[in-house]
Amino acid sequence: MKPQKKKLHPVLLILDIIIAVLTLILAVSIVMTVYTEHESDRYRYAPENYSYDMQEGNYKNLAVSFAMRTYHPIPEDQITPALLPYAAVGRYYKDSFYLRIYETMGDTERAAQAREALTAERTDMGVYQPEADKIDRIFSGD
């Protein structure tokens, strides 16, 4: 006498199929998430993204974007020579802001350090050095 297979209850069969489908959907979504995260890094560090902020005079966004790199560093394979001048503009904006604060507070030592940093960043800006004059006008108080 052969052992007879137990017949699954139709509800259990349907639940097994649903679990299999949901598992497949979960696996596909995990793969897609990993892929899109990798691709978004490539897009996120594209110089064209920062070029828009530069054209619009939105230097604050540049400063924030590159300040965040302290906590989320740009992967080495994403750093390109085209990205460096945008970082310099962002740092110039940030240091100009701090210079204005130090001068207002009368902190001459920190103000002198900020001026030195501005000089170095101005040279790092490359072709975007005219943007430094625009940033200076923003913080000049006129």
Image (cartoon, grey):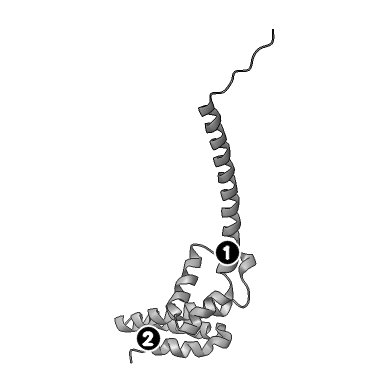
Specify which label sits upstream in the sequence, 1 or 2.
1
Q: Is residue 113 visible?
A: no
* SS state under label 2: helix
What residue is disc 1 on? 41
Q: Which disc, if any, is residue 139?
A: 2
Q: Residue furthest bottom?
A: 142
Whether residue 35 is visible: yes
Q: Residue furthest left?
A: 105
Which part of the image, by quadrant, shows the N terminus?
top right
Q: From the viewer's perspective, is residue 33 above or below residue 54?
A: above
Amino acid at circle 1? Asp
Q: CA distance from mark 1 to mark 2?
A: 32 Å
Judged left or right of residue 117, residue 48 is: right
Which residue is rendered at x = 59% and y = 42% of the image? 24
Residue pictured at 43% horizontal, 86% vertical: 135
User: Which residue corresponds to the image point at 51% horizontal and 62% vertical from the top-left?
Assistant: 72
Q: Are marks 1 and 2 in contact (CB under 8 Å)?
A: no
Depth check: give the residue in front, 108 or 17. 17
Q: On screen, 20 above or below 55?
A: above
- Please name the amino acid that badge 2 sits on: Phe
